[in-house]
Image: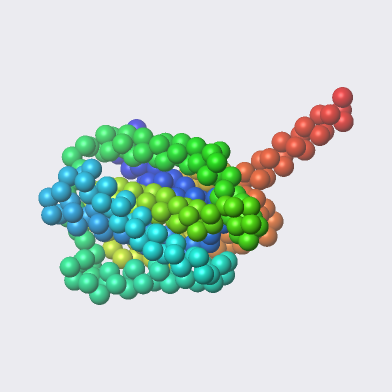
């Protein structure tokens, strides 16, 4: 692969980590989040600042994960009192708050962001292999959670919190766990992005990136790990193959999100399952 292909593949893997993290919160536990990019930004800014201070990449990434997870738990505490549309508004507010704070703090680079982030020193191919490994690890962990007792508890909370509570499911604990894990993944993605781009600005973590990652989850199928991964690959590649989309990305993603919610609410994963059932039914009738 050439440098361009390696860079594109690296960005796909970073987006997979980010989208799988949101799927943990919204897909598994049913908690709507419209400010996921804020946690992506927390990981990026934390890693960038530590890297410029001389910290190693493992330490910078780890601190970005921890900080994003801590803030995620704090935001998760708000989900204990608000639900659905109100929770969406709260998380969207967190996204705007993050961008506003970063823009006003000169120590964080203000409007100009942070540039000249130290290199990871691994070379493009080496860094891609690291990001690929981490994306596979996060995906595997997400699959493990989905099919574990925790995943079943998440399903109960997502379906009906009151009924789950009656059945002795600790709703509070599982909500906070979903936010902690999902936002920690976003922090990891942000730290990797900082080392990859070596230049970050507040707009990289604003409302548009949050809608973009939400679109990846919705198109793939809310709650489906493999569906989200496939949709992330497609939506990351789309602006590269269709350059005109780049200028109208928000419009295209918004229209795509509307179309999926209206005509295929279960996303690619749900459509694939429906197609398989139709083929099986047709085969049985032919027999």
Q: Residue at 49% of width from left, 50% of height from top?
A: 24
Q: How is the image coloured?
A: rainbow
Q: Quadrant of residue 278?
A: top right
Q: Residue at x 34, y 68 (%)?
A: 98
Considering the image in quadrants, where does the N terminus appear? top left
- Residue 102 in view, yes or no: yes
**Which residue sits furthest top?**
287
Q: Is residue 188 left or right of residue 47?
A: right
- Please, which residue is most extreme toward the left here? 54
Above or below, 275 relative to 153: above
For this rendering, which residue is in front, 77 or 123? 77
Answer yes or no: is residue 27 visible: no
Q: Between residue 6 and residue 23, name the one nearer to us.
A: 23
Relative image position of residue 191 (x, y in whole percent)? 29, 50
Instruction: List x then y, in percent, for residue 76.
Output: 44, 62
Which of the 4 quarters of the picture holds residue 74?
bottom left
47 or 118: nearer the eye?
47
The total number of labels drawn is 0
- Image coordinates of residue 141 in percent, x first then y, are 45, 39
Q: Quadrant of the C terminus?
A: top right
Name the side, left or right, on which 17 lies relative to 235.
Answer: left
Where is residue 286 drawn, in percent x and y?
87, 28
State left or right for residue 51 relative to residue 255. left
Residue drawn at (43%, 72%), measured in percent from left and top? 93
């Amino acid at each position: 692969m050439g440098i361009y292909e390696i860079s594109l593949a690296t960005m796909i893997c970073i987006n997979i980590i980010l989208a799988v993290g949101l799927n943990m919160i919204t897909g598994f536990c049913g908690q709507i989040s419209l400010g996921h990019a804020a946690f992506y930004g927390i990981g990026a800014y934390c890693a960038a600042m530590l890297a410029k201070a001389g910290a190693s990449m493992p330490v910078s990434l780890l601190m970005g994960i921890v900080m994003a997870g801590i803030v995620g738990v704090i935001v998760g505490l708000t989900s204990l009192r608000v639900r659905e549309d109100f929770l969406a508004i709260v998380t969207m507010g967190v996204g705007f708050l993050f961008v506003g704070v970063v823009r006003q703090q000169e120590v964080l680079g203000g409007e100009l962001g942070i540039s000249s982030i130290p290199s990871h020193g691994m070379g493009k191919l080496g860094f891609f292999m690291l990001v690929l490994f981490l994306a596979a690890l996060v995906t595997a962990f997400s699959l493990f959670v989905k099919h574990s007792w925790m995943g079943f508890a998440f399903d109960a909370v997502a379906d009906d919190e009151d009924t789950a509570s009656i059945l002795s499911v600790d709703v509070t604990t599982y909500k906070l766990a979903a936010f902690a894990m999902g936002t920690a993944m976003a922090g990891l993605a942000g730290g990797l992005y900082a080392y990859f781009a070596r230049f970050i600005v507040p707009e990289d973590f604003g409302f548009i990136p949050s809608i973009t990652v939400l679109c990846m989850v919705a198109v793939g199928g809310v709650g489906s790990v493999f569906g989200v991964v496939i949709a992330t690959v497609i939506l990351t590649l789309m602006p590269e193959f269709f350059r005109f989309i780049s200028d109208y990305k928000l419009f295209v993603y918004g229209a795509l999100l509307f179309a999926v919610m209206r005509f295929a609410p279960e996303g690619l994963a749900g459509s694939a399952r429906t197609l398989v059932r139709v083929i099986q039914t047709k085969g049985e009738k032919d027999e």
